[in-house]
Amino acid sequence: MTFVVTEVCIRCKYTDCVEVCPVDCFYEGENMLVINPDECIDCGVCEPECPIDAILPDTDSRAENWLDLNKRYADLWPNLTRKRPPMPEAEEMKEVQEKLEKYFSPEPGEGD
């Protein structure tokens, strides 16, 4: 089992999860985070830290389509190991549905 970041993170990018990860397996895109499933040790400490429930175990049916996206972009985006402020529009975007098609950016973030 591994954990994945889902579309709930898009245009929110809370980084509370990054701060608690013992293996630094989060990677930063322009407007979301992903988890490298090959580095994740399945400890689960990140999941309850996300204030918008954007992280799920890959055994959850809602995570099914997110494993490949997390793996693909973890290989392309820079590693992020420290907490940063969320995106300015995070509060208004946290309840928005179907963000992948409308708002996802494949561009990398800054990382550390």
Image (spheres, rainbow, N blue to C red):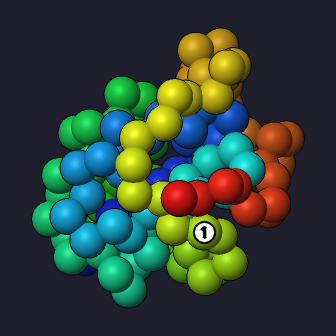
Question: Whole-percent x and y of residue 67?
Answer: 50, 72
Q: With 1 as the anchor, is 32 left or right in this view?
A: right
Residue 88 vertical placement versus 24 (above, below):
above
Q: Quadrant of the N terminus?
A: bottom left
- Please say whether residue 44 is visible from this viewpoint: yes
Please give the name of the residue rendered at 38% of the width and 70% of the height, measured from the top-left corner.
Answer: 25
> From this viewpoint, which residue is outermost toward the right?
102
The location of residue 48, given as percent across then percent down, is 22, 39
Position in image of residue 73 (x %, y %):
64, 73
The quarter of the displayed image where residue 26 is located:
bottom left
Q: How many marks?
A: 1
Residue at 67 percent across and 55 percent down: it is 110
Amino acid carrying mark 1 in the image: Pro
Does the image show residue 55?
A: no
Label 1 neighbour load within 10 Å: few <14, some 14-19, many 20+: some
Farthest residue to the bottom: give it.
38
Question: Which residue is at 85% across, 41% downward?
Answer: 102
- The answer to whether residue 53 is left or right of residue 88 is left
Q: Of helix, strand and loop, which one carries label 1?
A: loop
Q: Nearer the viewer, residue 59 or 79?
A: 79
Q: Could you say where residue 22 lies in the image, as x and y percent from the top left?
A: 20, 64
Depicted 69 relative to depicted 51: above or below: below
Residue bearing mark 1:
78
Q: Is residue 96 left or right of residue 50?
A: right
- Position of residue 110 relative to residue 15, above or below, is below
Query: Which residue occupies the extreme top position in the image?
Result: 92
Say whether residue 8 is left or right of residue 106. left
The image quadrant of residue 8 is: top right
Q: Nearer the viewer, residue 76 or 81?
A: 81
Residue name at image x 68 percent, y 35 percent: 11
Depth check: give the residue in front, 108 or 35: 108
